[in-house]
Image: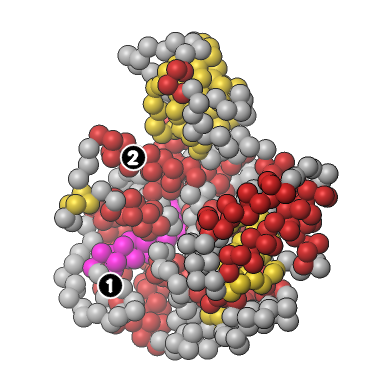
Amino acid sequence: MKKKSNLFQTNKIVGKDWLKYHPNTSPTDNYYIVLCNKVLKIIQKPGIAIFLNEADDEKELACMLVSYFEDVISETRLFSSFTRQHKQMYGKELPFYDFTDEYYDDEINLYDIYFLIWYYLSVGVENYVIDPLFEGDKAFFKSVLEIYNLFESEFEKAPQNENLQQFLQLSAGSNVETVRGKLTFIACHSYLWHAFFDDFFHDVINKYKKNETVVLDEKSEMDIYDQRVLFIFNICMPLLSMRANEYYAAILGEEHSEYQFIKNISKRIMGCFLLLKIESDGYLIEHLTSKKQIWLSNEYTAFEDIKLIENETVLYISLVEWTKDVWQNQGGCIMLKIDEMKGKDLSKHLFEDEGRNLEILQEYEKAFLDITNGKRIVYLRGVHEYADFYIKMSRIHAENTKKTVTDNELDEKYNTIIETHKKNKPFEKDEPVGIFFNPYRGMETFRERLVSGMSDQSNPHYANKVIDVCNLLTVKAFSKEFINYAIDNKLINLGVDEFESPKMFDVVMKNLDFLLRFYRLSDYFPKPVIGVSE
């Protein structure tokens, strides 16, 4: 990162900066704003400031660190929920660091501050992993220690934020609006999620910029609202790939009466549904393609001034399964007529049987392994070799499953593959490719730059190239299944960029799964896909 001059020493954190991270105001705000400005002065010294690009970065990091301090003081468990989950998964509270002192989740810990700074710097960074040890940077360590000592000196006199404590509580039987408000805070405003949401929302807003000005009409405003709802219910945060409801459940704790309800709130789906029946408390609707019927509660759904007709009105609607077999509208809804939908299939795969998809993948996997003599990776060159391999696999799959497939059908599939792929990466230049069969996702295709670094005896295209492990981790095209398989079988010639810390390779390898979650987010969790992934 580029070193910047300290032009922002006069910047002060004010109420609006602080309240970005809080659901409401509190009598304790003034105390924490003063503390934020003390931390800001430390951050603006060369040790930490060298890693930051703008004044807003300095202020946001200061607010984040003080929010962590407030969280510990107020016992609101935003950070300790992460450390407890991390310990359950990996045996210690934090990744990267070897503690010399005992870790206390109800106190300020020096390594928490190191980690939070690494986390803030890492959100949104592509193509490399920031050194979490900040090795050899004495000015950085001095600044972090100064912040830690400031927090320690304030620990006994800092006030608890009772408003935040109260807000994060949840009563049994809370309505949809109340629960959604808490999930919105977790996803969009809480200090562990805010930087991630801000990065996501920045990309959303940029789509509507014209000459550096955001221009919105009614449709784009609805699209932006819809993206926000998507973030709340579907997007996993970098820390442990948890969705907002899962993280809020962890904050409540397994002993809480609403823990399972919050944890089990589904992802949002969008699809076309025929309105079958109107009742006083909701609607029976049927998915147009699969004919699956579900119950839509009207607790958070109001079709005011809209004429609904049973067996005629089609809803293109966003839905979340709130409790078992009860769905809520979360996001947009468009009214259509059944006549307008004839022959259209806008949500064909919405209720696909993932178990059946996995069975189909297993059938293709057997055919793939039959050709490769049990190896999960095969090396080819160009689209014609790829098509030949795919057709051979299709023949064996048909034989294994006793399905009828004609030569004409295979010829047609061959020609389709050639036409589809010959102009697309990585096939457009007949370069070497690697094909990995992921048991959870199907066939994955990799380009020459990776293939040339795979020191597999069966790889004729190996060129003794070193693959930067940090680059491998941050490129989402490489599934976690492929990375784990290649590393476990020593198939990749791995290293780190010469500019990285000497200890980076060991740090990455010891925290591989945490980093796979961090950079893959929702993609960490495999979903059976019938077809080819590239």
Q: Name the residue that disc number 1 marks.
A: 53
What separation in Å lies between label 2 and label 1 (alpha carbons)?
30 Å
Name the amino acid, label 2.
Answer: Asp
* Residue 42 seen in render: no
Write the start and end of the magenta stretch as one range: 55-74
Give me the disc on residue 223: 2
Q: Residues within 10 Å of mark 1 (few under 14, many from 20)?
A: some
Rendered location of residue 383, percent (x, y):
58, 65
Name the amino acid, label 1.
Answer: Asn
2 or 1: mark nearer the eye = 2
Left of 444 or right of it: where is 177?
left
At a point 44% along the width and 28% down the height, the residue shown is 316
Q: Quadrant of residue 354?
A: top right
At a point 59% along the width and 80% down the height, the residue shown is 452
- Image quadrant occupied by the C terminus: bottom right
* Residue 182 seen in render: yes
At a point 63% along the width and 54% down the height, the residue shown is 414
Rendered location of residue 397, percent (x, y):
77, 51
